[in-house]
Amino acid sequence: MCAAPRNRLSRRRFAQALGLAVLPGAGAGAGAGAGADVARAAQRARVTIRLSHVVARQTPKGLALEHFRERVRVLSQGEIEVLIYPNSLLYGDEDEMQALQLGAVDMLAPSLSKFGPIGFPEFELFDLPFMFDATAQVHRTMQGAVGRELLDLLSRQRLLGLGYLDNGFKHMSANRPLLAPADFVGLRVRIQSSRVIAHQMRALGAKPVVLTFGETHRALAAGVVDGTENPVSNFWTQRMHQAQTDLSLTAHGYLGYAIVVHQQFWQYLEPADRAVVEQALAESLAWGNAIAQQENDEALAALRASGATRIHALDAVQRQRLRHATRGVHEALAARIGADWLRRMRGAAAAAA
């Protein structure tokens, strides 16, 4: 398969960062063997943390969470084990937040879009089109007052936000170039469950279709939807290039994640264990954010080398036309969450530019 070279690169970088040897078969997909590994790890450890996510291990998020697992093991001297269930193996887009609230899983790394549907529409600020121009700008915004206050909101549902993690900027794919608003008209576009993203697609003349991430490739291949939006790493690792002829580098929106636990689980941990988790997470989020752009760059290079998909770069005029067509999305969100939130986010983004 054409994805293999990139998977080897990702595993090598991950191992080198942790000072480990690269072993044959490392990073293999979860299956019966993975289940046995989980059972053995749980028997060895004093504390286990079940961590579910919906993307592949070789994505920026997947690699950062594997880094976190290993740092927790090292810092706790094996007494705390993080059991990772990638690729919707345990829970998917549609049920992972409920699973966390019910205690069926201990830690998640959901996309920021996931918080709007469960009662935190303020997080949809991150979904706004053309809010940010660079990942460094996003990082500074997240680390500032607005980013911290958004995580604090989660306490309303006894959730605790522990930090933010990058994937990168989203781009549009379809079976035709998407370079101007007119190109979107009539397209059925797969989106996450986000009112902001749905409004953005309608503003461009497209028809938003909410599907889980795990269903997206099949829906594209079957013609249920015509296109989607994703960072290049997701597009590549999910093999969407097998179902889409064109990728347009729109960089119209940002995709990031929040690391979140339930407060009851956090209180269950001993203070020393919480300190280990916090230290490991701080190290791993910094590491993950540092390699996210490189992972996307490598995915784009692999995609170009595969020749499977035509890649289109937008110029400044084309991006401005898309920005102009979606300008009403910002004001519509402000009407729902309050103009002050939008004003503060815009101010934070401008100060971080």
Image (tube, grey):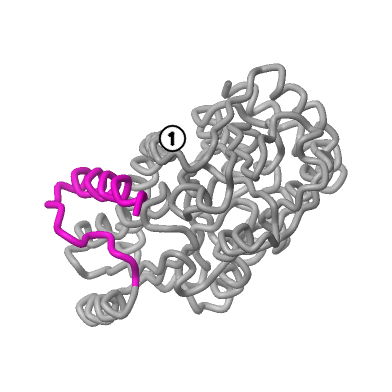
Question: Would residue 120 be found to the left or right of residue 12 on screen?
Answer: right
In this view, which residue lies farthest toward the left? 21
User: Is 160 above or below relative to 229?
Assistant: below
The residue drawn where x is 64% and y is 37% is 253
Q: In which quarter of the image is the C terminus?
A: top right
Question: Would residue 181 be found to the left or right of residue 69 on screen?
Answer: right
Percent from the top left, x then y, of residue 1?
Answer: 34, 54
The residue drawn where x is 85% and y is 35% is 328
Question: Would residue 186 be found to the left or right of residue 260 on screen?
Answer: right
The residue drawn where x is 69% and y is 35% is 178
Viewer-proximal residue among 75 and 132: 132
Percent from the top left, x then y, of residue 231?
Answer: 53, 42
Tell me the SS state at disc 1: helix
Percent from the top left, x then y, of residue 84?
Answer: 37, 67
User: Is 236 above or below relative to 168?
Assistant: below
User: What range of the chain is rendered magenta?
Assistant: 1-30
Viewer-proximal residue among 251 and 282: 251
Query: Badge 1: few (under 14), some or many (20 or more) residues near its Cα, within 10 Å?
Result: few
Q: Mark 1 points at which residue?
A: 304
- Amino acid marked by disc 1: Arg
Viewer-proximal residue among 225 and 132: 225
The residue drawn where x is 63% and y is 27% is 349
Membership of 29 in magenta stretch: yes
Membership of 353 in magenta stretch: no
